[in-house]
Amino acid sequence: MKSATLKKILPAKKLPKTDREQAVLLGLIELYLKTGKPIGSHTLQENGFESLSSATIRNYFSKMEAAGYLKQPHTSGGRIPTEKAFRLYADVHQGGGLIEKSQEELFEDLFKSETKEIASLLHRSADLLSELTKCAVFVSAPRFDQDFIQDVRLIQLDSSKLLSVLITDFGLIRTETIYLDAPVDIPFLRSTEEYFLWRMNKGEKPLFKKEAEAKMAQRIYNEIMVRHVVGYANFPEEDVFRTGLSKLLAYPEFNDAAALANSLSLLEDQNQMRALLRDCCKQNEIVSWIGNELCPFVPKDSECAVIAIPYRINQTVAGSIALLGPMRLPYRNLFGLLQVFSEQISRTLTDSVYKYKITFRTPTHASKSEVSFNAPGGNTKQIEVK
């Protein structure tokens, strides 16, 4: 896709009447996306529609309001787009997104070289995408093989409970909560970390003060490693992670706590997130859901939107990435951003798995786990160690 600077919609003077009406609607939406304020006829006339009289524009406004594309918050004020208008706007621009040169350069810098830390790459790219789009981002990913434990950290939560943190070669971080039958102290945890590294041939065997401590360290190691192996081998559903939730606080639409909670309800349920991401993978193209199209995943009239696109490894769809924001999103620019993002991360992941001889798996879904809806276009285990 060629880079381009976002442009004002074309004036309507050379368009047939029916196209003029749509151009006025698209122009109003463009201006509303920039300002977030109701648009009056004079304001629109001064922004690309000088060839039309304000009376003609008001007449178009009245027709579009009757057709459900516009609404007027106040009797004497301007108009704002409805969910129906945003759907039309998204449909018009879905096949021709635009991306600014500076945005494309940021992607090129992030994806400029292959890396073995594939999971870290996905996380970093999602963070950058969230920063550029000012949206929350959620991503589905396959399970990458040949991933080995690089380091371990044991964190004491209280006298008889600890948290284990496993760090892998690919940049994954996996946690487990472990319950103990006796209190432990910090020196014991450091020695147990050394014991883990010794068992993985990455250090010297530690010396414990008592035989009972050595046996407890061995039991902790066995418990954590068995959980890791079982969780790694079994892959019933895609790995999903999210970032950028705080970005939603910048939108006036989410200043109300209830409105924010309604939109975030989608991100609180990983089954719902997986259903949207999985549907995007099945459609194998960029797809968007606006407003009530997201029901029943969010409450009715939540006024939020999701845009998702798949990415590929060796031409095989491996997962998808989605943006969550208000209905008032710059869809044309976001379509362009996501298209370039998908192309570049697909290329980098493909080069990385080839260079480092990495294989990956996608889950096999049981029919009962599928969530169906009409589209428009890891838990922490707690087991006591005895």
Image: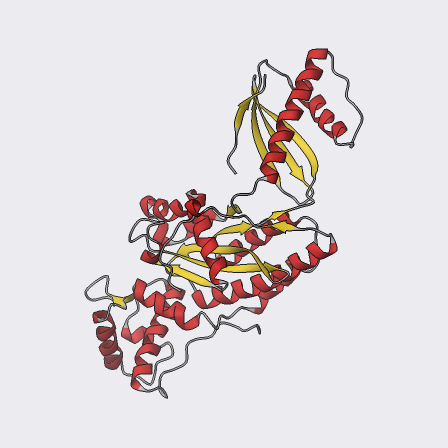
Image-based side of 241 in relation to 217, left or right: left
* Percent of width and height locating residue 349: 65, 57
Image-based side of 219 in relation to 159, left or right: right
**Residue shown at 52%/56% (left/top)?**
320
* Percent of width and height locating residue 312: 59, 60
In terms of depth relative to the viewer, which is nearer, 119 or 316? Answer: 316
Residue extending farthest to the front is 367
- Vertical comparison of 359 with 43: above or below: above
* Percent of width and height locating residue 163: 58, 27
Q: How many marks?
A: 0
- Colouring method of the image: secondary structure
Residue extending farthest to the left is 75
Q: Is residue 253 visible?
A: yes
Q: Which image quarter holds the N terminus?
A: bottom right
Q: Which image quarter holds the C terminus?
A: top right
- Looking at the rendering, which quadrant does residue 16 occupy? bottom left
**Residue shown at 42%/61% (left/top)?**
288
Q: Is residue 103 visible?
A: no
- Vertical comparison of 4 with 114: above or below: below
- Vertical comparison of 22 with 234: above or below: below
- Looking at the rendering, which quadrant does residue 348 occupy? bottom right
**Residue shown at 67%/48% (left/top)?**
117
- Looking at the rendering, which quadrant does residue 2 occupy? bottom right
* Percent of width and height locating residue 370: 42, 49
In terms of depth relative to the viewer, which is nearer, 352 or 331? Answer: 352
Image-based side of 158 in relation to 276, left or right: right
